[in-house]
Amino acid sequence: MSWPRYLVLLLLAAGAAHAERGDYLLGGGLESDSASGLRAAILASIGIADDTWLGGSASTSKVDLPFGRRSDVVYADIDIDHHFDVLGFSIGAAYWGDPDLLHSADLRGSLYFKNDRVTLAAEYESRNFDFTIPATDLFAGREFAFDADGIGVRARFKLGAALSLGLSGMQYDYSVNFVPDENRDALRLVTVSRLGLLSNLVESRARIDFGLDAGQKRWELDFSTWKAALDRSRTRSITLRLLTPLSARTDIEFGLGHDDSELYGNVTFFSVYLYGYGS
């Protein structure tokens, strides 16, 4: 799941799931990290019918790599979400990556149950990759195509008037068998933070978050972990977010987090996003 799309899901889960025709959400923001990475993103979601959202997002990331190289990663997606009485579904498509190194075209879908206290969802994702590992003095380089199918679950529970708990996980099955020891040295050349090329090329990921509504403010504490598909390295992350109003129709969100990765080490990141709502 991309970062901008996660924000849309979070905001809709916080109370905007029942769309009316013409309702909208607009947003945009920046994320920076201690490895000199920078991401800019925009997102939008509009009610095209009662209880039906059409959403999309786009982002670009710039990451400085070793030996004076730079990776420019782009992401774009679109999806539609319809909510019946207690059941709903969503379908979407996305493109992600750097055409010179690694990129993918994805299709996804989910079925979910939702009431005032519980959301339960089953998710599926199909991904098609093209990957070019650059050559170095010690590595001849390699180019290949492969695909992956992911199956996951997502749940959110309202534990009280102000407290919520979210759980999610996804497991991917790849069409190729990667050899971790052969890949690790080459991967260090293209991955220096979560904004780099391997942020979405994972074997599995899991996440737990706690949400607390304090007046008009919302706090989120997020613990997540993911395993890279190519070298089986593990990354563990913790993030604290604060969503607070700027006006009756605008919010601002601040995020501060830290990654502990077996591949790219320790990286701290900060984000700020602005949102506008209307009808």
Image (spheres, rainbow, N blue to C red):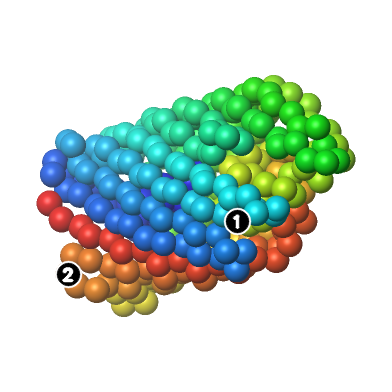
Can you name the residue that lies furthest to the bottom here?
215
Considering the numbered disc 2 on the image, is that residue within a helix, a strand or a loop? loop
Image height of 74 relative to 264, above or below: above
* Residue drawn at point x = 23 percent, y = 66 percent: 250
Q: What is the count of numbered marks?
A: 2
- Give the residue type at disc 2: Ala
- Give the residue type at disc 1: Asp
Horizontally, residue 273 falls left or right of residue 203, namely left
* Residue drawn at point x = 69 percent, y = 26 percent: 143
The disc label shown at residue 234, or none: none
The residues bearing labels 2 and 1 have C-alpha atoms spaced at a distance of 39 Å
Q: Earlier in the sequence, mark 2 or mark 1?
A: 1
Image height of 222 relative to 54, above or below: below
**Image position, residue 37 (x, y; %):** 55, 60
**In this rendering, the label closer to the viewer, 2 or 1:** 1
Horizontally, residue 177 falls left or right of residue 126, namely right
Q: Quadrant of residue 172?
A: top right
The residue that mark 2 highlights is 248
The residue that mark 1 highlights is 64
Image height of 54 relative to 62, above or below: above
Nearest to the observer: residue 181 or residue 55: 181
Nearest to the observer: residue 141 or residue 225: 141
**Would residue 209 be seen by someone viewing this image from the given angle?**
no
Considering the numbered disc 1 on the image, is that residue within a helix, a strand or a loop? strand
**Image position, residue 35 (x, y; %):** 62, 64
Around disc 2, counting alpha carbons within 10 Å, would you say few (fewer than 14), some (14 to 19), or many (20 or more)? few
* Residue drawn at point x = 58 percent, y = 50 percent: 70
Around disc 1, counting alpha carbons within 10 Å, would you say few (fewer than 14), some (14 to 19), or many (20 or more)? some
Horizontally, residue 191 falls left or right of residue 119, namely right
